Image: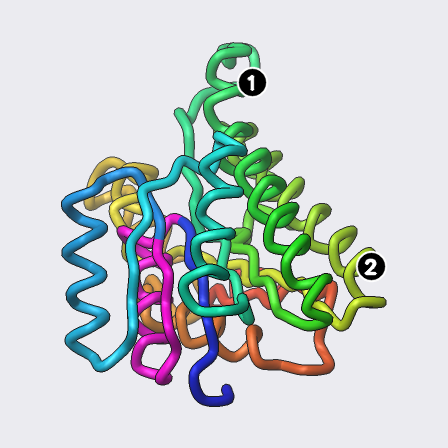
Amino acid sequence: MNDQKVVLVTGALSGIGRASALAFARSNASVVISGRRVDEGHALADALRSLGAQAEFIEADVRVEEDVQALVDYAVARFGRLDIAVNAAGIEGESMPIVEQTAARYAAVFETNVLGTLLAMKHELRVMSAQRGGSIVNVSSTMGARGAAGASLYVASKHAVEGLTKSGALEAAAFGVRVNAVAPGPVQTPMLDRLTQTPERKAAFLDTVPLRRAGTPDEIADAIVYVASASFMTGEVLRVNGGRTAA
């Protein structure tokens, strides 16, 4: 990655988003982070500055278009352009059979995971297309390419993220903008603990991973940094999952 890239990270306050913001800061980028928890946002911005990066936190809810537009416009006003955007905001929703799901639970998952990604891409592409260059990395999941009993809404939302990624890549290619996704498998984050619920269920789940462990947020962040700078890659989904989709 070239020096002094301007990077925007949504969902930056925990897990993969946080690790990505730190990785780009270590790569000499200027970083704008967003999320809804103000105190945690300012603390992370301070941590990024302690690494030598220029960093700003903006409170934003990816479900609200006015927030997303203001976030992207701030990044450009503050640093002059937008080179890389990482759309990491996402939730897992409640695990239950389809026959027990509700419209309200659907809306909660899809408004964050799908609408949030769509709105972020809309305004990132608005800027990047005008400047004739840029790179967007969406965060999908292993579940973006397969099914999972009890996790229908999360699975469907990540399939949608991958569809948005491929469609966005085709639309943006003429402007020199690349759109890709990174799809993690099990990663040691609070989301994994919520999904598995008990140490025993977590251990059994990780036994299905060929590498026999969860990934770390830093390992996924390294993949995101790579994809962001892979200059002949667009419309692709890089699966980083310890071998879960190899078979």
- Of residue 129 and residue 224, the one placed in the foreground of this image is 129
- Residue beneath the point at 46% across and 60% down: 77
Pinpoint residue 145: horizontal percent, then vertical percent: 65, 50
Give the amino acid type for the residue marked by disc 2 in the picture.
Answer: Leu
Secondary element type, mark 2: helix
- Of residue 23 and residue 242, the one placed in the foreground of this image is 23
Secondary element type, mark 1: helix
Give the amino acid type for the residue marked by disc 1 in the picture.
Answer: Ile
How is colour applied across the structure in the image?
rainbow
Residue indicated by mark 2? 170
Residue indicated by mark 1? 98
N-terminal-most mark, 1 or 2: 1
- Of residue 16 and residue 125, the one placed in the foreground of this image is 125
Find the magenta span and give its range: 11-33
Pinpoint residue 126: horizontal percent, then vertical percent: 67, 53
Pinpoint residue 79: horizontal percent, then vertical percent: 43, 69
- 229 to 212, vertically: above or below: below
Side (left or right) of 226 relative to 238 = left
- Residue beneath the point at 45% across and 59% down: 75
User: How busy is the neighbourhood of tag 2: few (under 14 within 10 Å), some, or many (20 plus)?
Assistant: some
User: In what quadrant of the picture does the C terminus appear?
Assistant: bottom right
| Cα–Cα span, label 1 and label 2 | 33 Å
- Residue beneath the point at 27% across and 52% down: 14
Q: Residue furthest bottom?
A: 2
